[in-house]
Image (tube, grey):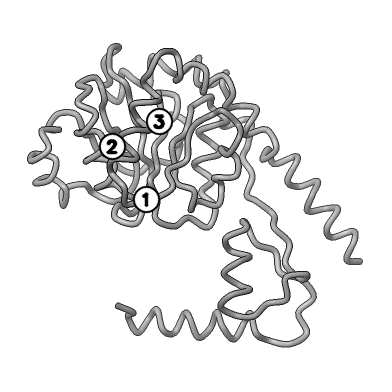
Amino acid sequence: FVMPRHRTLLRLERSYFTAPGRRQVVVVGEQVKSDLIAHYGVDPSSIVVMPNGFSVSEFSTQRRDSERASSRAEMGIADEAIALLFVGNELHRKGFGVLLRAVALTADQHLEVQVVGKADISDYARLIKQLGLEGRVRWHGPTNDVGKSFAAADLFVLPTQYEPFGIVIIEALAMGIPVITTSLAGAASAIAGSGAGQLQQDPDDVDELARLLGEALSGDNLAVWASKAPQAAAPYEWTEIMGRIERLLDART
């Protein structure tokens, strides 16, 4: 269902991307590039993929190590709990319901879902009760410092249906947090082949996500994935991204 506001935005978007005389379009991910080609006929040669970046002063394994205990205490996370962090200002598109059902399927009582963002989870209260997850799903509200929340996490999970990029994925990796997200996230390219997490192919497949959670909890996988996370994030440091932007601008002058 498309609202009048959405129709207006789509018309503006189409007029922008089909206007003549454009030299270059910079997008944050390959999926956005594919969408522009498919929906607006943008010349592929005029599109440059330039991902978002993160600040090493805000997101690092050193910060996670120094703030982990205090952050977990502040968020009410017990030492034996395995904290699955979900960050988002909307819930349905980000796959929150799928995550809840997958956690219930694992039957691991140590798993807790820690939710950070503007979207209140009260609409999911009935589902949480039905799944027997009461007391294991906590909403912490919005924050101006998501790095503090990352410091408390053991695993970042975002079973999103669509994500042009998803900088929170990169920020989690930079903090040494392994990631499970979907192949539909723009930042999924940082996970693929990195050994720092896993990609869910179908964002609606609860069984698939439950299997990936089980894999994360198997043996020392969490520790192994965490050790590889910072290297997966390294190409997205702002200094690296700004260097690429400068080279792009130099080439166009």
Q: CA distance from mark 1 to mark 2?
A: 24 Å
What amino acid type should be assigned to the residue bearing mark 2?
His
Which sits in the foreground, 197 or 240? 197
Q: Which residue is mark 2?
A: 140
Which one is earlier in the sequence, the residue at label 1 or at label 2? 2
Q: Residue at x 58, y 30 (%)?
A: 174
Q: Secondary structure at mark 1?
A: loop
Which one is earlier in the sequence, the residue at label 1 or at label 3? 3
Between circles 1 and 2, the one closer to the viewer is 1
Residue 245: which disc? none
Near mark 1 (Cα within 10 A), the count class, few <14, some 14-19 or many ≥20, is: many
Q: Quadrant of residue 161?
A: bottom left
Place of residue 96 in the rendered image (x, y in percent of width and height, measured from the top left): 29, 46
What amino acid type should be assigned to the residue bearing mark 3?
Ser
Q: Quadrant of residue 109?
A: top left
Placement of the C terminus among the 4 image quadrants: bottom right
Q: Count the labels in the image.
A: 3
Near mark 3 (Cα within 10 A), the count class, few <14, some 14-19 or many ≥20, is: many
Place of residue 72 in the rendered image (x, y in percent of width and height, measured from the top left): 34, 20
Place of residue 212 in the rendered image (x, y in percent of width and height, measured from the top left): 38, 33
What amino acid type should be assigned to the residue bearing mark 1?
Pro
Q: Which residue is mark 3?
A: 149
Which one is earlier in the sequence, the residue at label 3 or at label 2? 2
Q: Residue at x 64, y 80 (%)?
A: 41
Place of residue 103 in the rendered image (x, y in percent of width and height, measured from the top left): 25, 33
Q: Circles 1 and 2: CB distance less than 8 Å?
A: no
Residue 203: which disc? 1
Q: CA distance from mark 3 to mark 2?
A: 9 Å
Q: Residue at x 62, y 58 (%)?
A: 30
Q: Residue at x 16, y 52 (%)?
A: 123
Which sits in the foreground, 9 or 192? 192
Q: Circles 3 and 2: CB distance less than 8 Å?
A: yes
